[in-house]
Each structure stands twice: as structure tokens, then as C-alpha cells.
Image (spheres, helix red, strand yellow):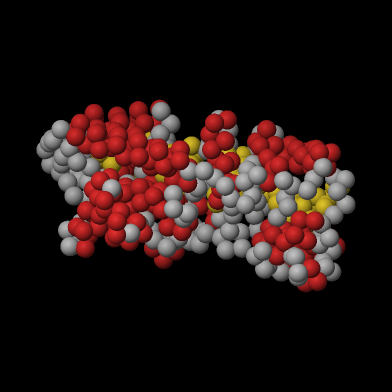
Amino acid sequence: MHCDGRVFRALTQRGAGAWKLAAPAAEQLIAKGMLAGTRELAPGDVPDGLRQSAPDAVMFLEHERVDFIAQPAEWTAAMLADAALLTLEIQLALLPHKLSLQDATAYNVAFRDGKPLFLDAGSIVQPARLDVWYALGQFQRMFLYPLMLVSRGFTPADVFLSSLDGVTPSRMARALGRLGWLRPSLLTSVYLPAWLEGGKAGGKAGGAGAQAGGAPTGNPEVQATILRANARRVQRMRDKYQPRGVWVDYRNQHSYSDADEKAKREVVQAFAARHAGKHVIDLGANTGAYSRICLQQGCRVLAADLDHDALDVFYREAGREGLKGIAFARTNLANPTPAIGYMNLERPSFLQRARGDAAIALALCHHLLVSAGLTLPQVARLLAGFAPSLLVEWVAPDDPMFKQLTAGRENLWASLTAEDFVSAMAQAGHKHKAEHQTGKATRTLMEFEANG
């Protein structure tokens, strides 16, 4: 629950008892950067409004707040794999403490500074047995099976936009085909669970045995062996995936000259410098050339793009470079990730979550107009909703890249002008503040500021 911009959890007597057992292990995970910061509130530190909203609670925890939480549908292949590896690593780390994660949902993982972060300290419980992980079936549905589909041309969005619970064994078995069972690893991880599911013997993993009375039984090394095998499998799939989308090499294939590109970077740099320490959204981030400029100027950046592979390249590079202050979201701005969960209230839509102090939209408007089929007023309203301060690149219809998009249909957009865009932005509540020429006559960088 949220109160005064902070994130809290109210615990019942049972939940408080579980937290007391989990707290020492949780502190170690927090220190390693694997678990979101969590602390128990002293009775005098509990806000009055929080206590009133949960009168039956016996304990309150405060959790670290994450600026932007990307939904699993907004992850790339590498992000999904890293979230899976973190979940397995935490489960392995809990075994020596005779503890376990009671569930393995992808929604328990967020990303901070480009690295996965486990959010749900309340998932740490004392299980009935240590030789089995009751959440393994859910781990397969939420991580292993989606990764297997990604290796076959799907994206995380293809999985999670259609199902909150990931991929069922029977669905995975159908995707693999009738001969897939000939591979021993698939027989045990997919086809046997699918058979059990068909016989109603599978059920949902997670709750059985959690919080059972008495000390856990069973040899934890048996479970650890299975967890390590899954980690190796996930890592192989991560390493094997080769991003090769249409826009992956855009940084080397754009139509700018070196001088024009240098001038464009200088405009972005100056804009970002004025928003140092603030939250900037890079709409159409591609592989992150301009996001990096914003980061270098001290901004916190959300990099959003439709092209899965381009964003996957950026995410992988950011990890290798150790970039801080960066978040990622793969989404279609013309059809953004919707609100999901109970009554569409559990997890807000992308447009509800993506709010910044400033935003940049470079070489994007013509794609929204042509590829997505939006009108100019619709594009303006969309951009205006992200931040009060905007830097937008206007690409004229006679630009080579615009012509490439509109081949055979040039007349539909031929009359659009920069003045039309300025007028549309004014109607959307953003006044034209400044514009910059980079030397390329068909492109103009425009700054807008929200009225008032």
C-alpha cells in the first residue's frame, strides 16, 4: 500500500511471525542488492493514515520505492532471463537459512539501475520441505517456458499480455510439437508436467507446505541441484539469443552526416543538462545513444522503444557498461501496455507509470503518423502526456526516411508542416519554446513547455 509517496506492507500476526524468521536472510539479500530495501517500522513511526487503513495489522514494513516498475510484458529477452536468474539465486541463497520463496511470479521482480531487483520480501517463508521447491511449476510457467518461446521468435509481450500466469505446460507442449518429448530435458520439464496438468494432478505451485509447523525436512542439496540446472539452462538461452531486429543497427544507418549528428547530440546534451537530477523519458530510445547523453548529464532515464531487439541490445550493453539511473520498457506507444490485474487496479498502464520531468522524442513522430496511423493531434496529445518539458524532432515529409516509410502513399502526408505540429502541440497544452537546426534541412529539433 502507498501513503505519502512511500511504500508499506501491513502484516497480520501470521505474517509478522514469518517476517521475524525471514528478516536475517532478507537483510543479507538487501545488502547484496538482490532484494528491495525493507525495514520494520517502530510503532511510533507508523503514519496515522496507514494505521487507519489497516486496523488489524500488528506490524508494518516499509519498502524501498522503485522509480519505474516495468511489467514483464515490457521486458526484453535478456531482462526476462536475468529476472529468472535472480529468482533462482535468491532461492539458492535462502536454502542454508531453511527458508524458501513461496512463489515465483515474474511480477515479484523489478529493475533498478538496469539490474533485476526482487520486490516481495513477504514471499520468504519457512517451507515444509527443503528437498523440493513448491514454486518450481510457477517458475517454469513464468520464466522457463516464456524464454523457450522467445528462442522461437516470440517476445515477453506475446506471453504476458495474454496471460498473467505465463505459459501452461500444455501450451508449451503444443508449441514444441509431438516430437519434442524425444529430448530428455523437454520430457521432464514440459511433457510430463503437461500430462499431469491434463490429468488434473499438477495444480498451481506455491502454497503447499509453506509456513508448515515444525522444522523443514528433506535434503536441501537435492533442490539446489535442480535449481542450478535451471540456472544453467536459462543462462544458455540468454547467451544464445541474438538480437537482429530492423532497428538494431540504426546508429550506423541513419541519414545524418557526422556534422549533423554532432549538432543533434549537442542540442540533446544542453536539454538534458537543464534537467540534471530529474527523470527524463527517452521515447523511441533504440539502442540508447541519446539516453546515454542524458545519463551523462545526471538525469535518471526511462528508455522506451517498440523494437524488442534494439532495446535488448541497449539493456545488455548497459549491464556491461554498469550504467546507473536507467530503466527500460518495451512498449508500443500507439498501443501501450494496459492496466492489468484485479479490476485493472493492481498494475497500472504504461501511460500511468511513465511520467517524467522531461521527455525526448527523436525521429519518432513520423513513425507514429505513418506506421501507427495516428493523426497529428493524437501524436501531440500522446507526447504532451509524458512530461511538462519536451524535446521533439520534427521530420518533414520530404525527408528520405519519411519517404521510405510512405513509399507509394506520399500524398497522404505531403502537406504536413512544422507549423502544423506546433499548432497541434499548442492545442495539447504545450507552447513552442525554442527550435534548433542541426544542418539537416528536413529535420528540426523543437522544445515545448507545458502551459502554466
**Residue nearest the viewer, comparing 387 with 336:** 336
Q: Is residue 186 left or right of residue 214?
A: right
**Could you tell me which residue is drawn at 31 percent across and 43 percent down?**
122
Which sits in the foreground, 424 or 414?
Answer: 414
Percent from the top left, x then y, of residue 216? 14, 36
Question: Residue 186: x percent and y percent?
Answer: 28, 49
Q: Describe residue 72's horizontal placement relative to residue 60 as left or right.
A: right
- Measuring from the top left, give residue 33's x and y in whole percent: 43, 31
The quarter of the displayed image where residue 370 is located: bottom right
Q: Residue at x 33, y 52 (%)?
A: 141
Q: Looking at this view, is 400 or 115 the one in front? A: 400
Q: Residue 179 falls in which quadrant of the image?
A: bottom left
Image quarter of residue 15:
top left
Q: Which quarter shows the C terminus?
A: bottom right
Asked if residue 101 can be seen in this view, the reply is: yes
**Residue shown at 57%/47% (left/top)?**
244
- Inspect this view and state whether residue 124 appears: no
Whether residue 94 sits left or right of residue 417 in the image: it is left
380 sits to left or right of 126: right
